Amino acid sequence: MKKLSMIVSACALMGLISCKEQKEEKKEEVKFLVTNPVKKDTTITKEYVCNINSIQHIELRALEKGYLQEILVGEGQAVKKGQLLFRIMPNIYKAELGKSKAEADFAAIEYQNTKKLADGNVVSKNELAMAKAKLDKAKAEMQLNQVHLNFTEIRAPFDGIIDRFHVRVGSLLDEGDLLTELSDNSKMWVYYNVPEAEYLDYMDKAHSSKTNVNLLMANNQIFDQTGVVETIEANFNNETGNIPFRATFPNPKRLLRHGETGTIEMSMPFKNAILIPQKATFEVLEKKYVYIIDKENKIRSREITLAGELQHVFIVKSGLATTDKILLEGIRLVKENEKIEYKLEKGTSVLSHLELYAE
């Protein structure tokens, strides 16, 4: 009987020890992790879908009617300014030029004879003036026919790359028919649309009229040249709420071509930005909140506004100071005005280990 009593007492003692350990574990479990916002300079990178255009991209069209006699270049070929590209059969225009030249020569002879007679007072000054006008008209017609003849040769107006042909040798052309396109790819104009709010942030943060940007190409590689934002259009699109930006990129290797797409990466600096972990926030009716721990260790919700977003981090525009204590973990386990026990970890340490803390 005595032995049984000792066994019961031992069990009771073990039970008390076990309950005590459970209570201590439970007490540790309700200790919440708290941190403070961090103020530091930072930079966020915004991404925008973009369209890539040659600095010059034009259509080459026939300026005269006739049969296409020669194509002197190939599709995709690099050409120089002034290089002959196409020739339209010039026979008719050569004949017209020859005819007008003969008429001009005849008018010149007639003018010289009339001038001699006028100098001898044989004919009036009016007849001399009419002969001069006839000569001038003949010269003008000759020059016009020379222009028409020149238009039978299509030359490159600038250095560039020839696009695909829309005609073939022997094609009967009418004035204005499209022959091909020509692109100057030495520099590229890259257009992208920026939302109104981000445009205002950009204008507020930009310290100069020119900002450097990067281009992420379709193969997920960064283009090896840096672009410069040189132009912002005057008006917003009322339907989309966006305003077009244009960045200029050097293209020395001619890697970029007209009509490509990509993604612009534009960095925006923030001085003395207030940074907090994203997981320390929650949302109510599309508004962001955090839980603040007051002097009495009670939970208080506070609305914040954001200025930007990084990986696992929010940049706070208003609503927080570095002296505030914000709840980092257990947001769903607490209630407004609830008193808690917590462990404070410095914000700098939390930010340096965000991969560990991120859910």
Image (cartoon, rainbow, N blue to C red):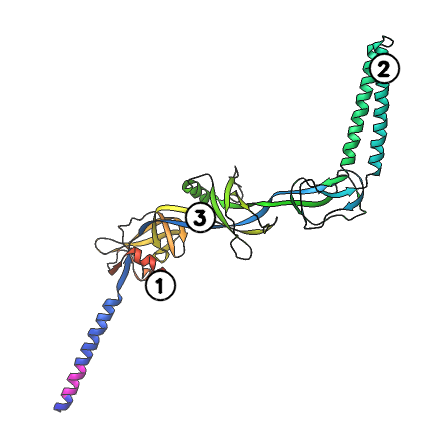
Asked which secondary structure carries label 1, the reply is helix
Pair 3/2: label in front: 2
What secondary structure do most residues of the magenta stretch adopt? helix
Please say if 27 is above or below 351. below
The residues tagged by marks 3 and 1 sit, at their Cα atoms, a distance apart of 26 Å
Q: What amino acid is labelled 1 in the image? A: Leu
Q: Quadrant of the N terminus?
A: bottom left
Q: What amino acid is labelled 2 in the image? A: Thr
Q: Which residue is mark 1?
A: 356
User: Which callout, 3 or 1, points at the residue further toward the start of the chain?
Assistant: 3
Q: Which residue is mark 3?
A: 267
Q: What amino acid is labelled 3 in the image? A: Ser
* Percent position of residue 35, x then y: 28, 56
Q: Which residue is more in the foreground, 259 or 336?
A: 259
Q: Which residue is mark 2?
A: 114
Please say if 118 is above or below 88. above
Q: Around disc 2, counting alpha carbons within 10 Å, would you say few (fewer than 14), some (14 to 19), or many (20 or more)?
A: many
Asked which secondary structure carries label 3, the reply is strand
Range of the magenta residues? 5-12
* Percent position of residue 273, x then y: 35, 48
Pair 2/1: label in front: 2
Q: Quadrant of the C terminus?
A: bottom left
